[in-house]
Image (cartoon, rainbow, N blue to C red):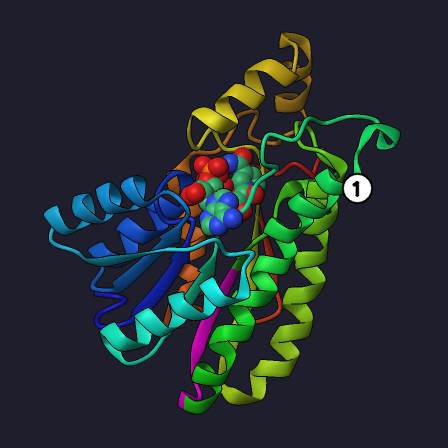
């Protein structure tokens, strides 16, 4: 089992992509702490993972709040004595519409950037001392194809913060590499991970725009949750031991046409 005994935190692990990362980690022997804002959802996901034989706990957390992030890491240390893997998955455009720049309010700017950039900084900051002391660790951050191309269905503040994740990842990889810590990112294209993304895909693009989007991809299709989970778990594994500072584009070849 690839993750036997490994202690992992998955932010936003209650649903969507994060739920898949958490389930697969636990299914391969990992001990997984899922964090998110919705207690009932967290409890239900943790119960499902346990029912499948996996080790999973949960900690209600707003990842934009430093005290709550500290409590999340503390709860993981109390449960299992340390943190080996951090997947910074919580993110999204928080139902903020994609509008012209002059219509973006400073509040809408700040809240989306807080979730997609500040939270990643806060979580990395909280685990770094532990990982440095144990001289090992794997951090994977969720960027987005929007970072490379601009948002298709997401607003400017989302693509900007996901682009910042790419440089954040490279910088932190340089800083933490001497301690044996790998820091990487994955940049998925649109993945219909749940009702929230499906609604945005359906409501924000006409059929013609969807068709044009798919034609830009070499594989001519959207990816699946499983097709993002594999690359993310690879970067969490020892097989990726010599990879750091990289943002892996998982988008069906969106750049090659
Ligand atoms: N699905 C896609 O098309 C896609 C594409 C590129 C990147 N991504 C990125 O992948 C990640 C997961 O996306 P998803 O499709 O599963 O989205 P989702 O909306 O289904 O899940 C987002 C998760 O983040 C959690 N979350 C939101 N705000 C939070 C907060 N303040 N504190 C703690 N948790 C919070 C939610 O509870 C949820 O578990 C996000 O970072 C997203 O930006 C998704």
Q: Position of residue 58 (x, y in %)?
A: 29, 56
User: Is residue 121 rendered magenta in the image?
Assistant: no
Query: Left or right: where does residue 72 sit relative to residue 203?
Result: left
Q: How many numbered badges does the structure rendering display? A: 1
Give the crowd class for mark 1: few <14, some 14-19, many >=20 residues within 10 Å. Answer: few
Q: Position of residue 4 (x, y in %)?
A: 22, 70
Q: Position of residue 174 (x, y in %)?
A: 65, 79
Q: Is residue 31 above or below residue 52?
A: below
Quadrant of res 158: top right
Q: Residue at x 24, y 46 (%)?
A: 43
Q: Position of residue 157 (x, y in %)?
A: 74, 42
Q: Residue at x 46, y 62 (%)?
A: 68
Q: Which is more toward the observer, 4 or 218?
A: 4
Highlighted range, magenta: 134-140
Quadrant of res 175: bottom right
Read off the residue under disc 1: 106
Q: Is residue 249 above or below residue 167?
A: above
Query: Left or right: where does residue 99 sit relative to residue 112?
Result: right
């Amino acid at each position: 089992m690839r993750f036997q005994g490994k202690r992992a935190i998955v932010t936003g692990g209650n649903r969507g992509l994060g739920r898949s990362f958490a389930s697969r980690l636990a299914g391969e022997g990992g001990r997984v702490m899922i964090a998110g804002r919705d207690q009932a959802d967290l409890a239900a996901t943790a119960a499902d993972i346990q029912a499948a034989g996996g080790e999973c706990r949960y900690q209600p957390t707003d990842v934009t709040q430093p005290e709550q992030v500290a409590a999340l890491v503390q709860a993981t240390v109390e449960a299992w004595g340390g943190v080996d893997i951090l997947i910074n998955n919580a993110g999204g455009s928080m139902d903020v519409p994609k509008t012209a720049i002059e219509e973006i309010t400073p509040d809408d700017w700040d809240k989306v950037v807080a979730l997609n950039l500040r939270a990643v900084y806060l979580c990395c900051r909280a685990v770094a001392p532990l990982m440095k002391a144990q001289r090992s660790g794997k951090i994977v951050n969720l960027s987005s194809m929007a970072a490379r191309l601009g948002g298709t269905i997401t607003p400017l503040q989302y693509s900007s913060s996901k682009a910042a994740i790419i440089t954040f990842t490279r910088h932190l990889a340089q800083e933490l590499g001497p301690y044996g810590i790998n820091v990487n990112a994955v940049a998925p294209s649109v993945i219909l991970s749940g009702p929230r993304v499906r609604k945005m895909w359906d409501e924000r693009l006409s059929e013609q725009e969807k068709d044009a989007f798919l034609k830009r991809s070499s594989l001519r299709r959207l990816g699946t949750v499983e097709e993002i989970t594999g690359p993310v778990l690879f970067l969490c594994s020892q097989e990726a031991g010599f990879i750091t500072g990289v943002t892996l584009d998982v988008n069906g070849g969106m750049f090659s046409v």
